Every structure is written in C-alpha cells, then in structure tokens.
C-alpha cells in the first residue's frame, strides 16, 4: 500500500483533511488519458469511457440521476445556494463551526438578497447528541428555509446527527443542505440514511482523487426546488456537451480510479483503520497534562480520522512553527 504513493521518503503525511495524496494508479490513469488524447485531440477529448456519475452514486448511496460531478465542495454549495432563490427575510440556520467554503454562499445571499444567516453556537466538546439537537431545534423559526450543516465539523471532528436533524427539518419543509467535504473516503457515506436533501463533497481530500474533483447529491424529490444547469437538468450527461462545456476528462477518469482504489480496499475497512489510528492517538495525547480534548468522546459523534486538542497554556501556532 505504501508503494502506491509518491510521498517523499521520511515524510509522514497527516493532512488529508486539506488535500489528499493521489495513489500511483490514479496518476497513471490521468497521464495515460492525457497522452492518448494528444494523439488525436478532437476524437478523444470529448467523453469518458466510464460513467463517473454512476460510480459516484454508488460510492455515496445515491441514485444515478441524483449525483453531479463538481470541482469541489464550495462549488457544490454555491450551486445549491444560488439555485434556491431565497428572498429577503428568509433564514439560513447554520453553525459557528462551518468552513468558509460552505458559508460564503449564504453570506452572499444575505448581502445581495436580504436573507438572514442564523448561527448556532456549538460547544467544544459536545456533551451528547441531545445537546446538538436542542441547539438546532431552538433556533428554527417560521422563516427558516435552509438548515446548512457540515457532516463532520472540520474544527473538532464532531459528526452531526443528520438523520435525527432531518426528522425535524423535513416535516417543516426546511431543506437540509450538507457540507460533506471531510467525509467520503474517510467514512462510508449513505446519503439516503442521512436523510439530507443535498450533499456536497470534495474528492481530492480523503478520497485521494485528482485535485479539482468533487460531488454534489441533490435528492430527487427536491430537484425542482434546486434547478441546476447540470446533469440533473438533462441538458448534458456526458463529459462534454454543448450545454455542459468542455471538462477535464483525464481528471474525471482519475476520480473514477480513486473510487475504484477505495472500493478494492473496502470503504468500511478504510473507516475502521482511521478509527483505530484515532483511538491510538487519543490514548497517547490524553496522557499529556497540557492538552484539553475538543473532539466528542462518543463514537457516534466522532469522525474516524479527525481529533482535536487545545493547549491549556501557550500558543498552538508557535508550536506549529517550531515543529
């Protein structure tokens, strides 16, 4: 497995949360297609020999006509937000732990159209699921149109109980929009079980796909509420069409190869290995008196591959610089 990666000898890489490493077979797939295209560009550039969308749908537990291939989570979140056509006074319920890539779309709607962003203050660490659900429920009003949450909080690794939140939002007609940037490739995802209405993710992180690849799921039943110019609209299903424009087919094929790589190992095995390393890390760090745990202790609220501690004294940036 280690030979699959081009990482510099002696370097231990721990930052798939920002950007992942492509396995050698993914890089080979991309390079081989680029060389193939340049032999006869017009004949080979417009179209992928595999259905990337079908692979992606299986990877996250969706149907084929509910998944579009995007460039990243931010693009997917922006596409959903701008399609909703929210009006002045409409409220977007979110949290103070959201990544800026998942927040900027709502901030734009607030500035340009008068929508209102309502932030729930999340504790760190979270005590239990009931505490999260109570904080979300208490901020829902008659004007709430969207509940926008990260599946996994990038700051603490807290896993939001989305299935429970969906039981609150769906009967009220509130769209549950999910920033899933940290999850596919780290944890096995089933968007149907989560009950979310939309789910945007970045495949260049834990999935180890080429940079500039992501996914967007939009539940079939709400697609008329989120009219996207994409695969959902039926205008362009192929890698290239007059309505969809030219795409990076080599990158899309690399995306498919990355999913094949995970499936060959086993997505549940990948998640189990991440959790094993997480437990090992916590045991070592819990013994250090100068650290305070910010991540949840409950397994069902804790991400497989993210654990966060705060310094009780001192400055973490200064330690980072020293290291």
Image: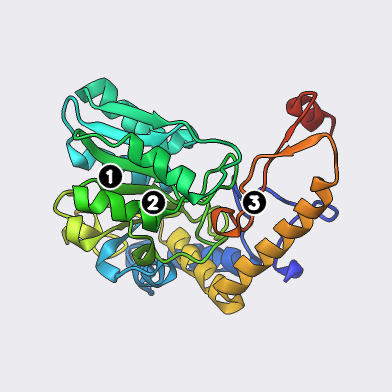
Q: Residue at x 29, y 43 (%)?
A: 79
Q: Secondary structure at mark 1?
A: helix
- Residue 308 location, x and y as percent? 67, 42
Query: Which residue is denoted by mark 2 in the rendering?
Result: 200
Whether residue 12 sits left or right of residue 102 in the image: it is: right
Q: Determine whether label 2 and label 1 are within 8 Å by CB.
A: yes
**In this orientation, which residue lies closer to the viewer: 165 or 24?**
165
Q: Residues within 10 Å of mark 1 (few under 14, many from 20)?
A: many
First along the sequence among labels 1 and 3: 1
**CA distance separating discs 2 and 1:** 9 Å
- Residue 177 location, x and y as percent? 33, 47
**In this orientation, which residue lies closer to the viewer: 197 or 161?**
161
In the rendered image, the vertical position of residue 168 relative to residue 41, given as above or below: above
- Residue 9 location, x and y as percent? 83, 56
User: Residue 195 appears in which quarter of the rendering?
Assistant: bottom left
Q: How is the image coloured?
A: rainbow
Q: Residues within 10 Å of mark 2 (few under 14, many from 20)?
A: many
Q: From the image, which quarter does the N terminus lie in?
A: bottom right
Q: Is residue 144 visible?
A: yes
Q: Residue furthest bottom?
A: 264
First along the sequence among labels 3 and 2: 2
Q: Residue at x 20, y 24 (%)?
A: 113
Number of the label disc, if any, that sits on residue 297: 3
Q: Is residue 44 visible?
A: no
Whether residue 12 sits left or right of residue 141 in the image: it is: right
Query: Which residue is denoted by mark 1 in the rendering?
Result: 80
Q: From the image, which quarter does the C terminus lie in?
A: top right
First along the sequence among labels 2 and 1: 1
**CA distance separating discs 1 and 3:** 33 Å
Q: Residue at x 55, y 53 (%)?
A: 301
């Amino acid at each position: 497995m280690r030979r699959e990666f081009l990482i510099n000898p002696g370097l231990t890489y721990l930052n798939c949360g920002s950007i992942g490493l492509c396995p050698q077979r993914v890089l080979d797939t991309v390079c081989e297609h680029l060389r193939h295209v340049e032999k006869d560009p017009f004949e080979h550039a417009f179209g992928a020999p595999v259905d990337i969308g079908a692979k992606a749908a299986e990877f996250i537990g969706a149907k084929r006509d509910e998944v579009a291939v995007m460039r990243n989570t931010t693009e997917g979140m922006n596409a959903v937000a701008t399609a909703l056509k929210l009006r002045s006074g409409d409220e977007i319920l979110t949290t103070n732990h959201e990544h800026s890539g998942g927040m900027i779309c709502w901030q734009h709607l607030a500035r340009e159209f008068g929508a209102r962003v309502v932030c729930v203050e999340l504790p760190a660490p979270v005590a239990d699921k009931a505490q999260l659900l109570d904080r979300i429920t208490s901020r829902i009003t008659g004007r709430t149109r969207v509940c926008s949450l990260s599946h996994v909080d990038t700051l603490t690794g807290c896993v939001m109980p989305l299935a429970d939140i969906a039981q609150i939002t769906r009967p009220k007609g509130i769209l549950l929009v999910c920033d899933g940037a940290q999850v596919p490739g780290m944890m096995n995802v089933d968007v149907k079980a989560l009950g979310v209405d939309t789910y945007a993710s970045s495949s260049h992180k834990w999935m180890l796909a080429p940079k500039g690849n992501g996914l967007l799921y939009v539940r079939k039943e709400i697609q008329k509420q989120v009219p996207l110019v994409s695969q959902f609209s039926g205008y362009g299903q192929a890698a290239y069409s007059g309505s969809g424009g030219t795409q990076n087919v080599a990158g899309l094929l690399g995306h498919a190869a990355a999913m094949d790589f995970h499936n060959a190992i086993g997505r549940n095995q990948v998640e189990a290995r991440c959790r094993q390393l997480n437990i090992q890390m916590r045991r070592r760090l819990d013994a250090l008196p100068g650290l305070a745990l910010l991540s949840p202790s409950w397994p069902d609220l804790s991400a497989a591959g993210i654990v966060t501690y705060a310094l009780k004294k001192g400055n973490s940036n200064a330690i980072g610089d020293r290291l």
